[in-house]
Amino acid sequence: MPKSALRPPSLVPCLWLGLVAVSLAACDVYPPTQHRLSGGTATFAESPNARPNYIFPLTSAAYFSATNVSQFQVLMYRPLYWFGENGQVKLNSSLSLAADPAYSADGKTVTMKLKGWKWSDGVPITSRDVEFWMNLLKANTDHWAAYSPGEFPDNVRTMSFPDSQTVVFGLDRAYGQMFFTYNQLSQITPIPQHLWDKTSDTGAIGDNDTNPATAKAVFKYLDGQSRLVETYNTNPLWRVVSGPWKLKSMTTRGRVAMVPNHGYSGPVKPSIAEFDLVPYATDSAELNDLHAGGVDYGYIPNQSAEQAGSLNNFMSAPWIGWSINFIQVNFNNRVNAPIYRQPYFRQAMQHMVDQQTWIDKILKGDGYPDYGPVPIQPANTFADAVEQANPYRYDPVASAKLLADNGWTVNPGGVSTCSKPGAGAGQCGAGIAAGAKASFKLEYVSGSAAVKQEMEALKAAFSSAGLELNLSEVAFETVIGDAFSGSTTTDMSNWGYGWIFAPDYYPTGDEIFSTGAPSNGGSYSNATNDANTTATVTGNVLALNRYEDFLATDLPVVWIPVPDYQMSMVRRTLHGWEAQDPLLQIYPENWYFTSP
């Protein structure tokens, strides 16, 4: 693992690799003279310009980020099934609100038994809360970022609730149990029907969700309230939670304070008195705060890796995500869509990405290549040899030849133009007019020096073949909002973090590359890919290989290196964090301080 020398020697024996895990094992690594303390406030650094701004768990693509979900919402609202255990991508039975699902012999019925846990107001979490979620979801699939047409919840034909603790789904067909548990049931978050089932502030709480029309109105109300970050401190909707934490205060700038939910039913109760999320405009601002001792759990930017040794009061550990990374292209852009729809042009762009140099020079070794839709790291059995072989290696000459062979006049350092319009061999392709320019706009996240350097490197590489790349640096929420707005003016987008496989933990990618999926912000559409994706529901790894091999070569996006999520820097007196979750979830209920 890159930069392992930065870890203190006492942590090395705790390092291990699982099937899909990289973890610093959760072991106590403090001298016997230190004593465990109770209480205290632990602070966690948010990613640059990535503040939480949406609290309602039924989240649309514009708000669907690790910042909002993995490091904010789930601390308060626990999903029915929790995934992530000791740094592994696996079902965590102890943290789930229900016992492991039971499938019928024919695979068409699944039964879930809740554990009898309670909301923070003492009201039991029941099957009615699951039904409430399902009814809202079924009526508002166009607003659910994890939705893929034909899959969950469409594939749930019948629902029954025999008692307050039992949920039974009748499915439209038999599915692989791993797929259905890891990618379908993973999408359920029980929500408090006894408090949220209304259509306005003054509306009556009732069974509004049982009618699709009023279920839409309930969602509209809750979604609208969730967008009002400035009201979170006083809005009674967000007072009752199921998780180990509840909101104490929050600012519109992203500063969040949470305190323990003393009524939490789960197995691990918080021992610290408060947990705070701290926002930063740039990674350099975070680094300054780290040096000043202003944050307990932060990160060191790639460009400043050499400073890790000077932070004597902190331990370092790489945090690798279960993710892929890419630049999204908009196949519906009103100007460039015909260009993006040409496979040869996408190949020409991919040939311009010098992934290994980016990793070595910009990421300082803290990252790994991405050549397709299945994560290569952490080590796993899903990424096959075809994807890992890098089908389109960095080759500017090959890129320019592809353009010239397909009707473009290549102008290195300038702007290449289509000189042979048409859909025949040696021509630019359908819909590309004579004189069309290879000129593109790329919006990327601000605050990260590494992302900025990567985009400048890409701009320079593109220019060698006359591909003009106009860069625009904007806030994270702006990039996400534009990328998933459905706008025909959005061109290329890089929000800096790619896609973390959650809540689609089995990496089929149906949420991001299937035709019509809400998180398919680039509107990529290919019948072969859709068929391949459908076949992955069996859980057969050969079907997954067909899917990943096709997208590694068809290029629905421009693949770029996956940076380590971060090089974590954690105060030496803070413990319980050591198993960093590749799903980017945090567990402050496990954290505790020791004496210096």
Image (spheres, rainbow, N blue to C red):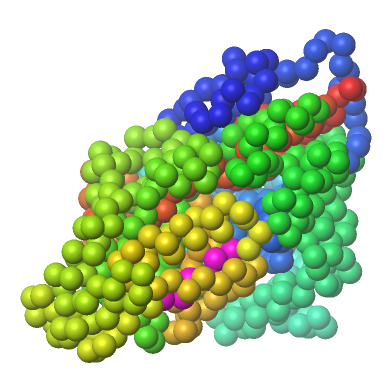
Q: Is residue 442 magenta?
A: yes
The stretch of residues the image draws in magenta is 440-445
- The quarter of the picture where residue 338 lies is bottom left
Residue 172 visible in the snapshot: no
Q: Could you tell me how many numbered marks the image carries?
A: 0
Q: Residue at x 65, y 34 (%)?
A: 306
Q: Position of residue 193 (x, y in %)?
A: 70, 66
For the point 69% across and 32% down, which residue is it?
308
Is residue 497 a member of the stretch shown in magenta?
A: no
Tell me the quarter of the picture where residue 154 sits. bottom left
Indicate the quadrant where residue 589 lies.
top right
Image: 444 above or below 181: below
Instruction: Find residue 320 and report its horizontal and vertical position in percent.
Output: 54, 39
Front residue of this view, candidates 338 and 349: 349
The answer to whether residue 163 is left or right of residue 572 is left
Quarter containing the C terminus: top right
**Is 66 in front, or is 534?**
66
Q: Note whether 403 is above or below 396 in the view shown.
A: below
- Residue at point 81%, 81% (across, down): 201
Q: Is residue 412 among what the camera can see?
A: yes
Q: Is 325 placed left or right of 587 in the picture?
A: left
Q: Is residue 63 above or below residue 272?
A: below
Taken as a whole, is the magenta stretch helix, strand or loop? strand
Q: In the image, what residue occupies the spot 62% across and 55% down?
A: 448
The furthest residue to the bottom: 434
Query: Where is residue 164 drawn, in percent x and y?
Result: 65, 54
